[in-house]
């Protein structure tokens, strides 16, 4: 009995030692080789069959326990990685930073070669690669993934993850040529796709791929899906924050616009009260425009139906008449202010009427639409003032008195401007001023025929100092004057001499044009040109001297402008050659000696001058004008150079 007891005790000790050995393996996570070596040593030592069965059972239990421990350890590591990823995703400031973080995390967590994300764009079925991580050449940001094929189509159709161990060899996937070419170029084999979605909103697909055939485990699929869910939630949050920022910005802009509109309305109300007080107190149009210009912070004026300026206060920038006319037509049709240029507005005084005047307002190039209510207030005040003025006198008699005042003893400029605007309905386009004279014995007939002639053409006629002044619609003084000369001479049966000027579009311009036309008439008489017609441009340098405003630049441009432009743009010396040639008595040889060039050079330059000025430029009457223009051009150039020199810093 003692022998049996000792044998049982020895077996018990062996069993305990074996159990402890396997527990030690499990505790220190020993490699599988140590388990195998323990089994082999027991077999070499001649272990009994019962012991070997116990060792095999210990081996299975230990390996199972170790596998469970390793699994839980891996899961803990994965969960910790997911928590770290969630923290990183929450800290992302924009889509790009988030997507790059997601692809990097996906590739590292699954230990694969490549990870990338494709997202939907608004209104499109295809997705576009927005981020990629890993060594890839063909797989780049911006690659369009077709919606009808590839592994992504399976993910979108099932709204669940989909994977394959070998993409190109998998017949269950609807292959697309573009996607297959990309997969082939990158050498990808195993691919896993997880949907990026928040609720029912499918945003795109997160992919992870390997260049080896690989059978992905359920844990790996679950891990990528969890990462995709975190990414989708973070992406949705970023986009929602972006929308909130946009909404807040828009609300701030709307609040600012509302405050600005309220302030503009308050200013418009105050301006309206002020302007109405001026109208009721009988103040003139200049007072209204002065107040309006001060309130608007710019220039203000009034023009006629065709954009001709009639009154102005402050400074209005010069604009093309065609642009102003077009804006006037649009403003009359719409009844609303119309911008001509940035900050320059045209406002109808009587909306819907093409024959009424318009308010001109120059608020500066930085002005916006906030001043429109104030413009309407000013236009209504001006319209009210003009209606009150029109009701005080018959229109036809007032028109005649107005023209008499212009060509006779002038009244105050303010009164003339107001009367011009009141009667601007009569002047629907620019006008030419004519001063006509015939034989003294037929003066009464000349006046009668001229009055009838003006009335037929919707113009005006006034008799002053033995001559007749006519205001005729038109923009070409030469053509209007010649027509008047021919018809009046035919009606009278005797030659009628006419001086012309214009076109005139303002009150001051009409008076100035009358003086210029009268001077042209006197010049024609002095030159023995009875029965003819002339304006300042027909009289050469005499016309420049007779003009109300001596337009020296205009005279130079009209006489030798083509030659000046040619020298300016081509850096030639035609002007000096022309001057020296005329000073040398029109001798090419002497001019060549003075200029120190070959006579052939002078001849070629003279040929070019002939092409620019015409074949008759050397006629005596043209030569005098050209010499005067050259002298004026030389003086202006010298003065300009002197001013430029004085402007240089010390």
Image: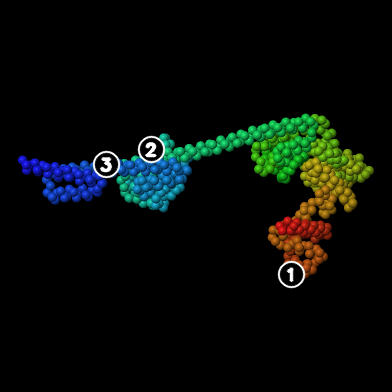
- Kindly identify the residue that appears in the image at 78 percent across and 62 percent down: 579
- Kindly identify the residue that appears in the image at 58 percent across and 35 percent down: 254
Q: Secondary structure at mark 3?
A: helix
Residue on which disc 2 sits: 159
The alpha-carbon separation of the residues under discs 1 and 2 comes to: 92 Å
Along the horizontal axis of the image, is 37 left or right of 311?
A: left
Check disc 2: other Cα within 10 Å, few if <14, some if 14-19, many if 20+: some
Count how many numbered circles sit on residues in the image. Answer: 3
- Kindly identify the residue that appears in the image at 77 percent across and 57 percent down: 639
1 or 2: tag closer to the N-terminus:
2
Asked whether the viewer can see residue 542, the reply is: yes
Along the horizontal axis of the image, is 43 left or right of 181?
A: left
Q: What is the x, y in percent for residue 235? A: 44, 40
Q: Secondary structure at mark 1?
A: loop
Q: Secondary structure at mark 2?
A: loop
Q: Nearer the viewer, mark 1 or mark 2?
A: 2
Along the horizontal axis of the image, is 466 left or right of 327?
A: right
The alpha-carbon separation of the residues under discs 2 and 3 comes to: 32 Å
Q: What is the x, y in percent for residue 585? A: 82, 65
Residue on which disc 1 sits: 598
Labelled disc at residue 217: none
Given residues 353 and 291, the one toward you in this image is 291
């Amino acid at each position: 009995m003692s022998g049996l007891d000792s044998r049982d005790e020895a077996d018990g000790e062996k069993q305990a030692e074996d159990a402890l050995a396997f527990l030690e393996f499990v505790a220190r996570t020993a490699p599988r080789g140590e388990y195998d070596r323990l089994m082999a040593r027991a077999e070499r030592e001649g272990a009994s069959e019962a012991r070997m069965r116990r060792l095999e059972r210990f081996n299975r239990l230990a390996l199972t326990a170790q596998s469970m421990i390793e699994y839980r350890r891996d899961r803990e590591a994965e969960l910790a990685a997911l928590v770290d990823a969630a923290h990183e995703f929450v800290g992302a400031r924009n889509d790009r930073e988030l997507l790059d973080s997601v692809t990097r995390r996906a590739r590292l967590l699954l230990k694969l070669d490549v990870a990338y994300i494709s997202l939907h764009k608004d209104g499109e079925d295809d997705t576009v690669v927005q981020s990629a991580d890993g060594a890839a050449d063909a797989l780049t940001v911006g690659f369009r993934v077709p919606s009808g094929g590839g592994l992504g189509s399976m993910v979108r159709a099932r709204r669940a993850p989909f994977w394959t161990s070998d993409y190109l060899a998998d017949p269950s996937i609807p292959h697309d040529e573009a996607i297959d070419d990309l997969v082939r170029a990158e050498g990808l084999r195993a691919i896993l796709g997880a949907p990026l979605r928040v609720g029912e909103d499918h945003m795109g697909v997160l992919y992870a791929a390997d260049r080896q055939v690989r059978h992905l485990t359920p844990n790996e699929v679950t891990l990528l899906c969890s990462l995709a869910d975190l990414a989708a939630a973070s992406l949705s949050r970023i986009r929602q924050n972006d929308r909130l920022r946009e909404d807040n910005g828009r609300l701030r802009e709307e609040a600012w616009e509302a405050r600005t509109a309220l302030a503009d309305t308050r200013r418009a109300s105050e301006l309206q009260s002020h302007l109405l007080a001026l109208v009721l107190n009988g103040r003139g149009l200049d007072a209204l425009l002065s107040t309006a210009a001060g309130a608007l912070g710019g220039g203000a004026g009034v023009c006629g139906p065709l954009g001709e300026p009639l009154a102005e206060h402050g400074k209005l920038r010069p604009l093309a008449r065609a642009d102003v006319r077009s804006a006037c037509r649009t403003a009359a049709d719409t009844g609303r202010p119309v911008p001509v240029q940035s900050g320059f507005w045209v406002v109808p005084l009587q909306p819907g009427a093409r024959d009424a005047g318009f308010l001109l307002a120059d608020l500066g190039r930085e002005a916006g639409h906030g001043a429109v209510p104030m413009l309407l207030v000013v236009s209504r005040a001006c319209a009210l003032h003009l209606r009150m003025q029109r009701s005080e006198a018959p229109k036809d008699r007032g028109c005649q008195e107005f023209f008499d005042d212009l060509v006779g003893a002038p009244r105050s400029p303010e009164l003339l401007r107001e009367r011009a605007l009141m009667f601007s309905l009569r002047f629907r386009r620019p006008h030419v001023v004519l001063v006509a004279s015939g034989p003294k014995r037929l003066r009464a007939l000349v006046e009668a025929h001229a009055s009838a002639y003006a009335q037929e053409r919707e113009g005006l006629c006034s008799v002053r100092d033995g001559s007749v002044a006519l205001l005729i619609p038109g923009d070409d003084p030469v053509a209007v004057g010649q027509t008047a000369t021919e018809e009046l001479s035919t009606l009278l049966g005797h030659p009628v001499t006419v001086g012309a000027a214009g076109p005139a579009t303002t009150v001051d311009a009409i008076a100035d044009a009358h003086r210029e036309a009268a001077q042209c008439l006197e010049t024609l008489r002095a030159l023995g040109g009875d029965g003819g017609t002339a304006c300042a441009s027909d009289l050469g340098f005499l016309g420049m001297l007779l003009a109300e405003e001596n337009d020296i630049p205009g005279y130079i441009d009209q006489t030798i402008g083509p030659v000046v432009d040619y020298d300016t743009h081509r850096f030639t010396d035609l002007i000096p050659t022309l001057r020296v040639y005329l000073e040398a008595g029109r001798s090419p040889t002497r001019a060549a000696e003075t200029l120190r060039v070959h006579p052939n050079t002078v001849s070629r330059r003279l040929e070019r001058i002939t092409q620019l000025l015409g074949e008759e430029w050397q006629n005596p009457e043209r030569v005098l004008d050209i010499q005067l223009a050259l002298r004026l051009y030389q003086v202006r150039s010298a003065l300009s150079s002197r001013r430029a020199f004085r402007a240089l810093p010390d």
